[in-house]
Amino acid sequence: MNIPSKEECFRLIHRMEMMDHIIDHSIMVSNVALCLCRFLGEKFPLNIAEVRSAALLHDITKTRSFTTGEVHSETGGLLLTEMGYPEIGDIIRQHVMLDTCSLDAPVSEPEIVNYADKRVLHDQVVSLEKRLEYIRVRYGSKPEFKDRIQLMWTETVALEQKLFKQLPFEPSQLSDLVLPIIKK
């Protein structure tokens, strides 16, 4: 398995000219994902390097999507796959909607990155309700998006229950355990 290092991730982030606020969001998503791995890794065989890289790069094509109209989860996944990182590309592709989420299956890397993204609004860890309400207001103006957002909401609530059944703390305590972004 080929996984870009943290340094390679930041080189790619800068090469893709990601907006600063999207970089801050991606760093915080990575911090949340790594926090979850710290606790879940005791019970599940998780690839922490894979989670870190996929979380840092999950919005890699989002800046350009504002101009192109592309679906950033799909094009970001494709970009990393074409660069020789198919596992990272697959996680990025699933950061908005998971292919599957079985409540009985072990916790997976795509689930952790997907959930971490749903808990970070801009660069702050927020409740699932606050983040999903933001998504609903920001992206839910078209009827076809409303149905997709409702499905995402239902699946994310189930995912949160799955994850926190395995964790020694409550969802409301997550923000206290995550490292903050240190800005220069």
Image (cartoon, rainbow, N blue to C red):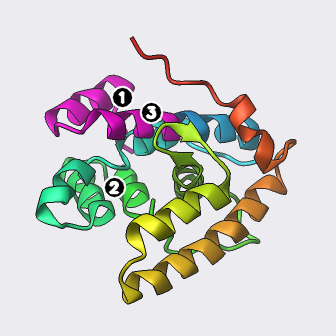
**Residue 8: image location, x then y, percent:** 28, 28
Q: Which residues are magenta?
A: 1-30
- Which residue is denoted by mark 2 in the rendering? 89
Q: Nearer the viewer, mark 3 or mark 2?
A: 3
The residue under the point 63% across, 67% down is 156
Left or right of residue 145, residue 156 in this image: right
The residue under the point 38% across, 27% down is 6
Earlier-in-chain disc, 1 versus 2: 1
Q: Quadrant of the N terminus?
A: top left
Q: Identify the element where label 1 is drawn.
A: loop
Which mark is on residue 27?
A: 3
Q: Quadrant of residue 94?
A: bottom left
The rendered magenta stretch, by its main secondary structure, is classed as helix
Q: Are marks 3 and 1 in contact (CB under 8 Å)?
A: no
* Mark pair 3, 2: CA separation: 18 Å
Earlier-in-chain disc, 3 versus 1: 1
The residue under the point 22% across, 27% down is 11
Left or right of residue 141, residue 136 in this image: right
Q: Quadrant of the C terminus?
A: top left
Q: Identify the element where label 2 is drawn.
A: helix
Which mark is on residue 5?
A: 1
Residue flagged by tag 1: what amino acid is it? Ser
The residue under the point 75% across, 38% down is 39
Q: Quadrant of residue 68?
A: bottom left
Q: Is 155 in front, or is 138?
A: 138
Residue flagged by tag 3: what amino acid is it? Ile
Tell whether position 12 is magenta: yes
